[in-house]
Amino acid sequence: MSVINLRDVPVRDVTEGDIVFSRQMFGAAAGTARIGASRYVVAPLARQMPVHVHGDEEEIFFVLDGSGLSWERDGACAVGPGDTIVHPPRRAPHTFLAGPDGLELLAFASGSETSITYLPRAGVMWCGPRWVPVDAPHPFKAEGAAGALERPEAGPRPRNVVALGDVDTGTLSAAEVRALGVAAGSSQAGLNHVSLGPGSRGAPPHCHALEEEVFLVLEGSGTLRLGEAEHRLSAGDVVARPPGTGVPHAIAAGPDGLTYLAYGTRVPGDSVYYPESGQVRLRGLGVTIDVAR
């Protein structure tokens, strides 16, 4: 499956102490190979996840609605719609605390080779399908047993938290692009906010050898070109493009324009094929080859 809508993604509800949220794993539902992508709706004044830090996976969060605190190592800052938060691996333990109107988040993760996640308050480490100590309770229950997380006063924003309006726009073809992930310090992946005017197109048709992409439509309508096929797009649609398919894709806006988030991994040895120009870009070398000649 390549295109789905959020309304068709199963919802999982979690309650454990002050952790209360619903989650939709829309990346897996759309067919991502490595990328993790989820929508979280956190109950008012509740917590989003156990305090945790990943061993080798980078996370990028985008706030859709509501308000709350981005909590990092005993400190916190206020966040709201349009904010992006990047959490590199092996850095500060983190979570989110919802405000009185709740908090709606998108979470994107680059994928992990180890599946190691450390929960310092719970004293548990998640390792693949199990956790250590092996006789410990489930990590969520261990976190619940550690008690509710104290809610600190909001302080200044660290560099890994940026507002949509504070990120300069660049242009890619007729697209207005804000590189949110880069602005907040991401390195393993990128998260771009893309706005297309009526009838305009984003990046030309292309396909990646190693990098994976997932797109989420925020507003407007348009079409996805996938090889020779076309699919209509509207708000809530998710497009997954695993690497190595050899099938080019491109997104174009309809008469009311189109706004979407584009998340993609960053792999140094990646190559990108552009069938319209007959070119292959070797990203790791900074070289473009004209294969049409």
Image (spheres, helix red, strand yellow):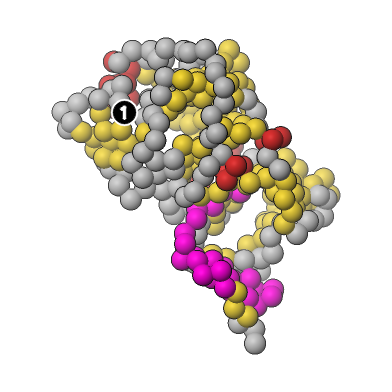
**Does residue 28 show up?**
no
Secondary element type, mark 1: strand
Quadrant housing residue 223:
bottom right
Using residue 147 as the reference point, say whether residue 74 is left or right of it: right
Judge whether residue 286 is colored magenta: yes
Quadrant housing residue 62:
top right
Q: Which residue is mark 1?
A: 119
Instruction: Tell me the residue at 30%/16% (across/down).
Output: 146
Instruction: Tell me the residue at 39%/41% (across/down).
Output: 89
Using residue 79 as the reference point, say whether residue 95 is left or right of it: left
Mark 1, other Cα within 10 Å: few <14 / some 14–19 / many ≥20: many
Nearer-the-camera pick, 23 or 113: 113
* Residue 160 image point, x, y percent: 53, 35
Nearer-the-camera pick, 117 or 207: 117
**Does residue 251 show up?**
yes
* Residue 53 image point, x, y percent: 37, 34
Quadrant housing residue 124:
top left
Instruction: Tell me the residue at 40%/44% (across/down).
Output: 57
Nearer-the-camera pick, 252 or 122: 122
Q: Amino acid at mark 1?
A: Leu
* Residue 132 image point, x, y percent: 20, 33
The image shows residue 211, relative to residue 79, as above or below, that is below
* Residue 190 image point, x, y percent: 55, 49
Nearer-the-camera pick, 5 or 269: 269
Q: Quadrant of the image for the C terminus?
A: bottom right
Q: Which residues are magenta?
A: 262-287
The image shows residue 98, relative to residue 32, as above or below, that is above
Judge whether residue 10 is colored magenta: no
Instruction: Tell me the residue at 53%/42% (across/down).
Output: 185
Using residue 249 as the reference point, say whether residue 107 is left or right of it: left
The image shows residue 99, relative to residue 176, as above or below, that is above
In the displayed image of the protein, which residue is found farthest to the bottom? 293
